[in-house]
Amino acid sequence: MVLVCYLTNAQKIDPDVDAMSDKVESKVIEWRRDFHQNPELSNREFETAKKIAAHLKSLGLEVTENVAKTGVVALLKGKQKGKVVALRADIDALPVTERADVPFKSTVKTTFLGKEVGVSHACGHDTHTAILMGVAEVLSKNKDKIQGTVKFIFQPAEEGPPPGEEGGAKLMIKEGVLKNPDVDAIFGLHINSGTPVGMIRYKPGGTMAAVERFVINVKGKQTHGSAPWTGVDPILISAKIIDGLQTIISRESPLVDEAAVITVGKITSGVRFNIIPESAEMIGTVRTLDPMMRKMIIRRMSEMVPAIAKAYGGEATIDFQNNTSITYNDPTLVTQMLPTIEGIAGKENVILSKATTGGEDFSYFQEVVPGFYFFLGGKPHTEAKAPSHHTPDFYIDESGLLLGVKVMSQLTLDYLNAQ
């Protein structure tokens, strides 16, 4: 009851936090533009990390570099002892050539998987990084109001490490980022090009999907295309498998509870029009928002794939690789902290939204400690529809960054001081 009462009374932003956030806004925009113009891919965020570390050191924080290869972690200890709250921002860019017409447009090119590609912050991680740098400055100037410790986590490789490498949230956790001191709760945000500036979207429970990558290898018997009865057609078997997998979603999954998706995104087989090949490979993804549905779908796929192949005289195997877990917002933590967000953004601007089948490796932190992950509006009010994330035309209105600084700063104070 004490916690609920405190947060009810703490809905409005602390005047000092409000003033300091306004003061740091121009810096946040400047940092964001610098990161945007100089993007770096996952596990290669060397210069990005140097700039982050230099700023945090200038604030007098305890800074650790080279965490999970290129990550940066900093500690801010308050005047009084208490709990530990972590704030996380992802820092990597994408192999996407930017088309957005902005003066700080990225022209960076690099080699990715053997191909020359453009590099850009086509998902807004540059804004996340700049916002958290601003929060660090705001809170460091209000150290006397902090009851406990703030751990700033600047995480590399959210988009996934290069093949053959470890990285991202998993590696940070493996290297002990949630320990020494032990984190009690973690907060994170994601800019959203489809949500108007000034608005925040959230959802208790499953808010983003667990993401599995799967590979199916089908083995048949090669023969001449004019005499299919003398062989076993792996392309036909593949078609039957694809069809069968969709029945797991349409006939076995309780979609009234949560959404789920099985998608085959690539199929490779054959070399010539008149040859039935010996093998086929399919690569795809599974997206789930409920732990029990996730287990059921993976189990049924594992049962169905070899059974369908056998029914048509062939063989098939399926292998899974987990890319993210379910981004699960702890319902109690959401209830406790929602008044803070509503008090700063305005209750009418804080929207309870549906889940999305996109994935986020922030989910791995939430498997260890309670977490709250929400979406910050970045769409200009003058645009009816904005380009999607991960596209060349992705664009964010920088006027939305200030709200991110204020909300993350006040969430931190209210969480720690509620104890």
Image (tube, rainbow, N blue to C red):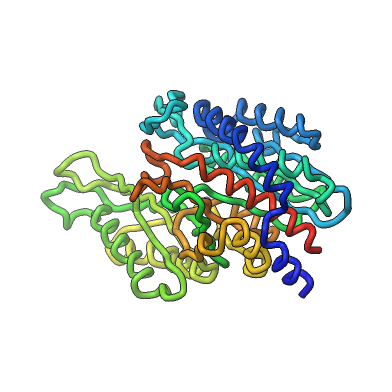
Residue in the picture at 77% in, 35% down? 63
Left/right of residue 22 with respect to residue 387 in the rendered view: right
Q: Position of residue 343 (x, y in %)?
A: 62, 61
Depth check: 245 or 202 in front? 202
Residue 306, picture quadrant: bottom left
Query: Which residue occupies the foreground of this view, 346 or 137?
Result: 346
- Percent across and percent down for residue 250 are 34, 71
Q: Quadrant of the C terminus?
A: bottom right
How far across and how far down the image is residue 216, in percent? 39, 53
Give whichever of 17, 308 is nearer the camera.
17
Pick out the residue farthest to the right.
80
Determine if residue 162 is in view.
Answer: yes
Residue 122 relative to residue 62: left or right? left
Q: Is residue 3 left or right of residue 213?
A: right
User: Quadrant of the image for the N terminus?
Assistant: bottom right
Q: How many marks?
A: 0
Residue at the spot 33% in from the left edge and 70% down from the top edge: 247
Query: Extreme left residue here?
Result: 226
Q: Tell me: 348 left or right of 307.
A: right
Q: Position of residue 164 (x, y in %)?
A: 55, 37
Q: Is residue 154 visible?
A: no
